[in-house]
Image: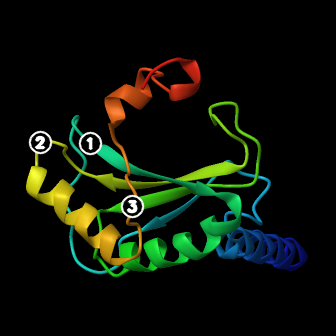
Amino acid sequence: MAGRAKGSEIEEHSAMLRKKQVLERTPSQETSAYWIYAERKIGKYPEATDRSGKWLIFMPMERIDSVWERIMKATEEGRLGGSVKAATAKPNSNAVNSDRKVICVYSYDWQDREDVMRIRAELRSLGVTWKIPYKADADTDAGRYRVTGHT
């Protein structure tokens, strides 16, 4: 029995280390998953409503790691919304251009214009000064992507 418990413990520890390695990878290094994620660690943020959405930050693959690092940190510190995700190096059929990747910065409700614009202002302070679109999650759920003809 003790051998089995120890083996199970070792397997659990190995799984935890693999998960940590995946979490520590940058978007340009990750090839086994389509997305990497970060969540708010400081402060509270409202739960997503059926009107949740996200700012879409498109950029060349060679710049995504540095921008992701700033956005991930700001999210964890409670300066943005509740969560963010970044497209990785794994090829994705929903991508319009394989050389450009996206970071999604989520807001809980697009009708809360003050919060949506607060997040955009914070993104501007983080160096995202180019035009960025906002997309409702309902549009994503309905399969509305630029690659399929939706703008």
- Of labels 3 and 2, earlier in sequence is 3
Residue 83 is labelled as 3
Residue, disc 1: 52
Quadrant in the picture for residue 136: top left
Q: Element at badge 3?
A: strand
The colour scheme applied to this rendered structure is rainbow
> Is residue 126 found left or right of 97 in the rendered image?
left
Q: Position of residue 57 (x, y in %)?
A: 46, 54
Q: Element at badge 2?
A: loop
Depth check: give the residue in front, 116 or 100. 100
- Of labels 3 and 1, earlier in sequence is 1
Q: Residues within 10 Å of mark 2 (few under 14, many from 20)?
A: few
Q: CA distance from mark 3 to mark 1?
A: 12 Å
Residue 111 is labelled as 2
Instruction: Please say if 39 is above or below 3.
Output: above
Q: Position of residue 133 (x, y in %)?
A: 36, 44
Q: CA distance from mark 3 to mark 2?
A: 18 Å
Q: Residues within 10 Å of mark 1 (few under 14, many from 20)?
A: some
Q: Position of residue 145 (x, y in %)?
A: 50, 27
- Of labels 1 and 2, earlier in sequence is 1
Q: Position of residue 3 (x, y in %)?
A: 90, 77
Q: CA distance from mark 1 to mark 2?
A: 9 Å
Residue 33 in view: yes
The amino acid beneath tag 2 is: Gln
Instruction: Please say if 68 is above or below 104.
Output: below
The amino acid beneath tag 1 is: Ser
Quadrant in the picture for residue 118: bottom left
